[in-house]
Image: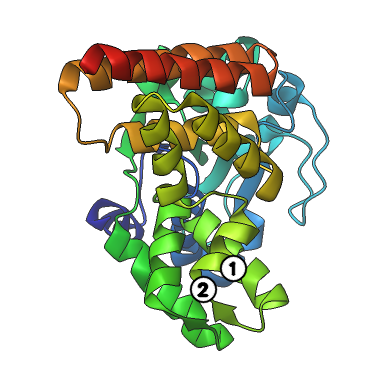
Amino acid sequence: MSRLQSYAEKKNLPHLLFSGRAGIGKTCAALALARELYGDDVEQCFLELNASDERGIDVMRSKSQQTKANVTSVKDFARTRSMSGVPFKIIFLDEADALTSDAQQALRRTMEQYSGNARFILSCNYSSRIIEPIQSRCAVFRFSSLTDEDIRKIIARVAKGEGLTVDDAGEKALLYVSEGDARKAINCLQAIADVANGKVTEDAVYKIASRARPKEVEAMIQHALKGDFMTARKELHELMVRYGMSGEDIITQIYQEVTRLDIADDVKVALVDRVGEYDYRLVEGANERIQLEALLAQIMLAGQKKA
């Protein structure tokens, strides 16, 4: 993030668009940049809004916002000059991809009119949902998922600060359930600290996260591939009952394990295609138990073709 550091040092920046999956530091980067720029004046010069809470055009024009800066809207905040040593204010719109099209058009016009007084930082999970006129006005930062080493450093820092004991198996389990999302890892650590006397073990992580162990999901898939449908069906039932997992959670883990299977690529592609189809059925409201058992049946059929 040397570019952001350079902006802070020069006290000048363009409009910014932060794009990337949840839990990888977009909001933290915006807050850190604001604090670096404004110091003690950050509350008067920095306005943060969550666009998913206020999706309509009113949040751009006249929605009342109770802030210490006593501003009444994004537009009013943008039109007033900064009283700090930095010649502009910052308006941070988190989850901007949730804004309606009309709201984004109003935002585009506000960005255009008041660029001398304010800079906008937009944070989103999907940049494709931001209209092109706004994207063209912003310097785009695409945040990648955190690596396992990054998550390990966060786990070690939190564990040291909170007096937690994390064994190797517990760390691997945290890496698995977090999937590069620092927020998931930290929330899991906090929950474990409250109920497990500060000992972070594999069992505690999977229980708190309501996730099955990878080897259990893999065993279920292998039984289906080998034609033992009833055993795979029984293991599916145990996962849903023991861990209280939803159908979408289970199908996500099935997808993760399918991609790791040591099988021919054509069989793996066929299985991924089936997983995608049944995931869509679940999203559309189909019965979880029936659809997951049907997916196991499809996996068994794929195993028979492979043989």
User: Residue 127, position in %: x, y?
Assistant: 42, 25
CA gap between label 1 and label 2 equals 5 Å
User: Residue 285, position in %: x, y?
Assistant: 70, 14
Q: Which is more toward the observer, 302 or 112?
A: 302
Which residue is identified by label 1?
204
Label annotation for residue 201? 2
Q: Does residue 281 lie above or below 81 as drawn?
A: above
The residue that appears at 79% across and 26% down in the rendered structure is: 62
The residue that appears at 35% across and 59% down in the rendered structure is: 8
Q: Can residue 26 be seen? A: yes
Q: Does residue 256 lie above or below 89 as drawn?
A: above
The residue that appears at 55% across and 64% down in the rendered structure is: 205
Could you tell me which quadrant the C terminus lies in?
top left
Q: Quadrant of residue 56?
A: top right
User: Residue 146, position in %: x, y?
Assistant: 34, 53
| Badge 1 density bin: few <14, some 14–19, many ≥20, Cα 10 Å | many
Element assignment for label 1: helix
Element assignment for label 2: loop
Query: Amino acid type of disc 2?
Result: Thr
Label annotation for residue 123? none
